[in-house]
Image (cartoon, grey):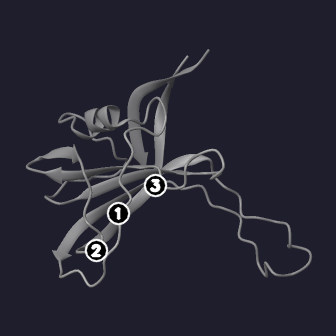
Amino acid sequence: MCELGKNLKFCTCITETKVIHNKNSRRNKNLKPDKTNQYIWFLSRFSHRFEPMMEGILNMPSHQLNNTLTNEIVLENLNQKDKNCFDFDYIAFEGDSISIKFDGDERTSHLYDFLSFIYEDNVWRVGMHDSFSTSTQLLQKGIVEIEVIK
């Protein structure tokens, strides 16, 4: 039996989904774009703060998405000093943030479940920017590869 390991890799390779042209035609009426059923990540850089112009409620991050994607395991991988868990050269800056969510069938996972981390004081921590008063710029996105132990 295979089990999921604790080593994660943040890959920039994203599986292309099939584009349905003229989705209102009768022939394509019942077709839906393919879901990838994988976990995707978004790496963003803090840009600036601004005065909030609207009020609302923030969705708070989860503590785990599955047995391997937990806050503790992701932080363990992100904070390794001797190993880069990204598939590109990346140096974290103060205020960088990464979020992870399931990119699959919403019926099998809660629509708003996600993990969120922020780089503060030279270490990754659980946290997120307030989207009502903070502007960020997307740096990179991709899929999370999880080590499988046989």
- Label 3: how many residues lie within 10 Å, few (<14), some (14-19) or many (20+)? some
Give the image quarter of residue 124.
Answer: top left
Q: Nearer the viewer, residue 112 or 32?
A: 112
- Label 1: how many residues lie within 10 Å, few (<14), some (14-19) or many (20+)? few
Q: Label 1 amino acid?
A: Leu
- Do residues under tags 2 and 3 come within 8 Å of each other at their CB atoms? no
Q: Position of residue 37 (x, y in %)?
A: 62, 47
Q: Which residue is mark 2?
A: 132
Q: Residue at position x 85%, y 67% from top? A: 30
Compared with residue 46, is residue 101 higher up or lower down, i.e. above or below?
Answer: above
Q: Which residue is mark 1?
A: 58
Give the image quarter of residue 6.
Answer: top left
Q: Nearer the viewer, residue 63 or 48?
A: 63
Q: Label 2 amino acid?
A: Phe
Q: Quadrant of the C terminus?
A: top right
Q: CA distance from mark 3 to mark 1?
A: 24 Å
Q: Choose mark 2 or mark 3, whichever is in front.
A: 2
Q: Choose mark 3 or mark 1, whichever is in front.
A: 1
Q: Which residue is mark 3?
A: 142
Q: Using residue 119 as the reference point, say whether residue 107 is left or right of it.
A: right
Q: Using residue 106 as the reference point, say whether residue 93 is left or right of it.
A: left
Q: Nearer the viewer, residue 105 or 89?
A: 105
- Residue that extends furthest to the right in the rendered view of this protein: 27
